[in-house]
Image (cartoon, rainbow, N blue to C red):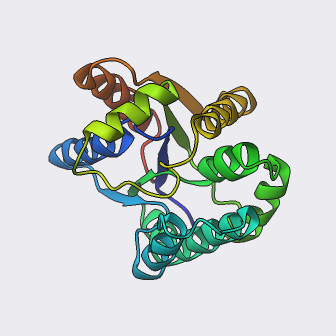
């Protein structure tokens, strides 16, 4: 039985969420909170191998439905092998991306349809949804500009998409914000890093305090 808390972070490319969630996990651990940091696609060996296929810049011929199915497959294995066991033990899972990414990127931006992508993932996730999602919002040109300046960050196949693709991704996230206002909290990620981080950490810390794990 699930007893822990599942917290995810979302956002367009270059929103800074990965750096923030790493610092957040470290600070929560310092406070004595049992927290596990992971990511999608990836987090475990099989899913990391699928990630390499999905994000490899050489795979430009990949069909959008193939892409969506690969994300769902990686998600299933990640959940079964890592996330669900951690939640059953009562821990807090911090995950860099989850289902909302597929809905925004493949469902809306790729034009497959959010309902269609959700149906694929409904089979994969078996009703495992985040308790809280932080959406880090930034204009596409700002986010991509950050990536070009960050030489240590991987440049993947999605980073190389045209600007209109990234604008559709952001539109998709706004649609999800409207659809799931009780679960998803929007954070202005265009501000200085320390301000964004503190905003995000305060939200998560308050959420954990109000919903202690059993």
Residue 6 at x, y percent in the picture? 49, 52
View extreme (bottom): residue: 46
What residue is at 20 percent from the left and 49 percent from the top? 32
Q: Note whether residue 155 is visible.
A: yes
How many numbered dots are placed on residues in this image?
0
| Residue at image point 44% right, 68% down | 42
Residue 137: in sight, yes or no? Answer: no
Residue found at the far left of this picture: 30
The residue at the point 75 percent across, 65 percent down is: 65
Indicate the position of residue 124 as horizontal and vertical percent values: 69, 70
* In the foreground, 197 or 163: 163
- Up/down of 140 relative to 150, above or below: above
Q: Quadrant of the N terminus?
A: bottom right
Determine the image quadrant of residue 167: top right
Residue 132 against residue 97 in the figure, above or below: above
Residue at 38%, 60% in the rendered image: 38
Q: Nearer the viewer, residue 22 or 90?
A: 22
Task: State left or right for residue 138 relative to residue 105.
Answer: left
Tell me residue 158's x, y (percent): 53, 52
Closer to us: 108 or 35: 108
Location of residue 110 in the rendering, given as x and y in whole percent from the top left corner? 73, 49
Quarter of the figure that contains the C terminus: bottom left
Quick check: 159 above or below 185? below
Q: Is residue 77 left or right of residue 49?
A: right
């Amino acid at each position: 039985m699930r007893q822990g808390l599942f917290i995810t972070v979302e956002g367009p490319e270059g929103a800074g969420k990965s750096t923030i969630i790493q610092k957040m996990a470290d600070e929560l651990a310092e406070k004595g909170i049992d927290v596990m940091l992971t990511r999608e696609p990836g987090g475990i060996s099989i899913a990391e191998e699928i990630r390499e296929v999905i994000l490899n810049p050489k795979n430009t011929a990949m069909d959008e439905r193939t892409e969506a199915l690969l994300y769902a497959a990686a998600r299933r294995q990640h959940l079964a092998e890592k996330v669900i066991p951690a939640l059953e033990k009562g821990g807090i899972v911090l995950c860099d991306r989850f289902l909302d990414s597929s809905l925004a990127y493949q469902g809306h931006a790729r034009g497959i349809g959010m309902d269609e992508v959700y149906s694929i993932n409904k089979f994969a996730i078996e009703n495992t949804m985040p308790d809280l999602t932080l959406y880090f919002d930034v204009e596409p040109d700002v986010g991509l500009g950050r990536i070009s300046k960050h030489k240590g960050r991987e440049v993947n196949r999605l980073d190389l998409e045209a600007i209109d693709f990234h604008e559709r991704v952001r539109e998709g996230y706004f649609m999800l914000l409207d659809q799931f206002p009780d679960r998803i909290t929007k954070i202005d990620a265009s501000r200085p890093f320390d301000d964004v981080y503190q905003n995000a950490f305060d939200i998560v810390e308050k959420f954990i305090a109000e919903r202690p794990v059993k």
